[in-house]
Amino acid sequence: SAVISQKPSRDICQRGTSLTIQCQVDSQVTMMFWYRQQPGQSLTLIATANQGSEATYESGFVIDKFPISRPNLTFSTLTVSNMSPEDSSIYLCSAQAAGVGEKLFFGSGTQLSVL
Amino acid sequence: QKEVEQNSGPLSVPEGAIASLNCTYSDRVSQSFFWYRQYSGKSPELIMSIYSNGDKEDGRFTAQLNKASQYVSLLIRDSQPSDSATYLCAVIGFRAGNMLTFGGGTRLMVKP
């Protein structure tokens, strides 16, 4: 399995500010994804982080609000921009590791609260 | 119709009993199926994967897949209070490429 380090683990932010979440995987991975999980809900895919090119966003998510970088195979960042209280959620980095098929592993998550 | 459906629960079982968690999916050509366990405040943890019809056992966990009925289940034998968590079913379907689609999760409560 892949070990995924995600930071920060939690943050409390003011409305209108931005937060960048970092995700580091301990081995080369084929795919990296960012999910959001709102309280009491299941996981919603935000985007696929593509190495060296623009991320692929799901319906309802846009690059201006959630810019994503993936400069290499093992690292990605998600920025939550111009935050509002509706962005309060858990954000999860995930990866599909090479050699273990399509299994998806998750980082520990970032609990974001926006005041 | 949701692509992956689960009963939200809570499913309450006494300690030592068998917990049965069910999941149905809509994409008939789905290929890969996963069960994740998520404790409150934690991230999902992969506990089982299954790719072909039938049963797959791993310790106290058994995953069952029936592609004709578009149904996948997870049985937990000898349930323990530490099994109390939300269980997420996830499916990789033809339409979704290589990405997982998650169900809403079933909350399991194992009572001592």
Image (tube, grey):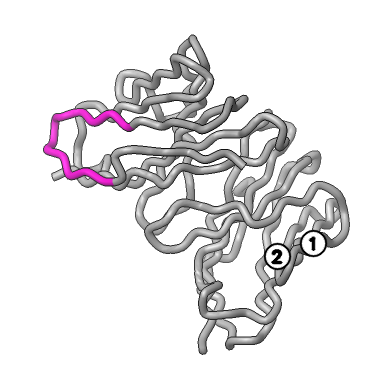
Q: Which residues are magenta?
A: A10-21
- Which class describes the residues within 10 Å of circle 1: few (<14), some (14-19), or many (20+)? many
Q: Is residue A23 above or below residue A106?
A: above
Name the kind of residue labelled 1 in the image.
Answer: Gln
Residue A13's x, y, as percent?
16, 39
Residue type at the position of mark 2: Leu
User: In this picture, is B53 found above or below B80?
Assistant: above
Left or right? Give the position of A59 relative to B99. left
Give the secondary structure at mark 1: strand
Please state which of residues B3 and A57 is positioned toward the viewer in this rendering: A57
Residue A31 counted in the magenta span: no
| Residue picked out by circle 2 | B74
- Subunit ID for the residue under disc 2: B
Measured from the top left, where is residue B57 in percent x and y? 79, 64
Is label 1 in contact with label 2 (beta carbons under 8 Å)? yes
When the figure is inspected, residue B26 is found, relative to residue A14, above or below; the finding is below
Image-based side of A112 in relation to B83, left or right: left
Q: Secondary structure at mark 2?
A: strand
